[in-house]
Amino acid sequence: MKKKIGLLYGGKSAEHKVSLQTALAVINALDYEKFEIYPIYITEQGEWIKGPLLEGKVETVAALQFSNGESLPPTALAPALFTADSQNAPFDIIFPLLHGPNGEDGTVQGLLELLNLPYVGNGVLASSAGMDKVIMKNIFAQAGLPQVNYVWFIRSEWEHNPVAAYEKVEADIGYPCFVKPANLGSSVGISKCTNREELVTAFKEAFQFDRKIIIEQGVTAREVELGVIGNDLPECSVAGEIIPKVEFYDYKAKYEDGNTALVIPAEITEAEYKLLEGLAKRAYKALDCSGLVRADFFLTKDGKAYINEVNTMPGFTPFSMFPLLWKHTGVDYPQLIERLVQLGIERYDEKQRIKYTF
């Protein structure tokens, strides 16, 4: 029997376009002999539209943005949305291909938990904590993971006394520093600052995308990343290094102008790899992750490693870092997708062992 997969993509997020590219890649990589694939497109306005059963590969993202599909509110927990066919046969698994808020942050995962449906990727806690950089770093600090210094602010605090916020950054962090929205990925809204004028502009930019921002100390280091997959027993890929041709690895460098080089495997020593592997697994377990993450590190010339963040739904096209890391580890793109589907089913089966009566 073919497994019935519901693909969730799009989303009410600044990373909507990234999600569409991810969905297109996954749809064209899945084995149609093994899976029935049902697309569910979430518009930028938050409308959920169920598309027809896919019969084969799709050429463009435009074909995945349905204008005449069946529109249903997820809050109604409508059976027709979360079942695969007219006979209301349940999906075997849901695959959320959502990046950023309203999808990668635990909201959709919570809905799927309430529906008691298996799904690919991280659960509610890991997704929400991994989305909020402040919460994530606080958990990493409690777990004893090495990090660069950071401070954070909410918008109302900054609006009440902006000068005090800038002075705190200068006293606790200094320059250079990086200003980021706390709850966003794909390097959206991030700025590098070397003086007060740039800091003021960066605060204004970041607060456009979130009510909370984080400011991190700049460090002279290489940017090295590992892919992690698994549930209770995570495994790590080879390491990869990002070498931006611009000042830092921003949104344009990632998705638009190609101003970056990915070196896989990274040219690091065995001891450095073992250090990063150990930190990646500790971070994975600290957040109680499942399915997949990409773990990002700073590696200095003297061999010190600092964890920057983990991404609980990393870029997932065949040309993104996470799939490329696993390709160089010996797991190609279609195999990786199937492995993640299996991990989602295994985690669901494990959770069914929990007793809810006494």
Image: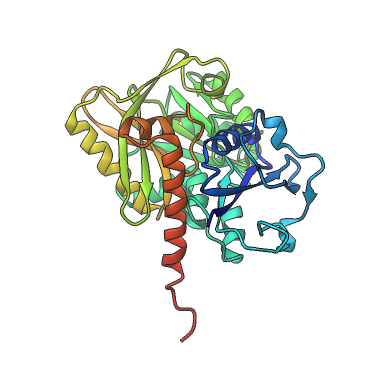
Q: Return the residue nearer the eye: 331 or 277.
A: 331
Q: Return the residue nearer the eye: 112 or 85.
A: 85
Q: Position of residue 343 (x, y in %)?
A: 42, 53
Query: Residue furthest toward the left?
Result: 271
* Left/right of residue 354 with respect to residue 17 in the rendered view: left
Q: Which residue is rendered at x = 31% and y = 34% of the image? A: 329
Q: Where is residue 204 in the image (x, y as percent from the top left)?
A: 64, 29
Q: Is residue 171 visible?
A: no
Task: Please tell me whether residue 337 is drawn above or below residue 238 in the rendered image.
Answer: below
Task: Please tell me whether residue 77 is drawn above or below residue 176 in the rendered image.
Answer: below
Query: Residue furthest toward the right?
Result: 68
Q: Where is residue 202 in the image (x, y as percent from the top left)?
A: 58, 26
* Left/right of residue 78 with respect to residue 145 in the rendered view: right
Q: Can residue 348 be seen in this view?
A: yes
Q: Which residue is rendered at x = 43% and y = 60% of the image? A: 347
How is the model colour-coded?
A: rainbow
Quarter of the image where one finds residue 74: bottom right
Q: Where is residue 96 in the image (x, y as percent from the top left)?
A: 57, 47
Q: Return the residue nearer the eye: 46 or 70.
A: 70
Q: Which residue is rendered at x = 32% and y = 49% of the image? A: 234
Q: Which residue is rendered at x = 42% and y = 43% of the image? A: 293
Query: Residue furthest toward the bottom?
Result: 358
Tally of numbered tags = 0
* Left/right of residue 272 with respect to residue 157 in the rendered view: left
Task: Please tell me whether residue 314 is drawn above or below residue 220 in the rendered image.
Answer: below
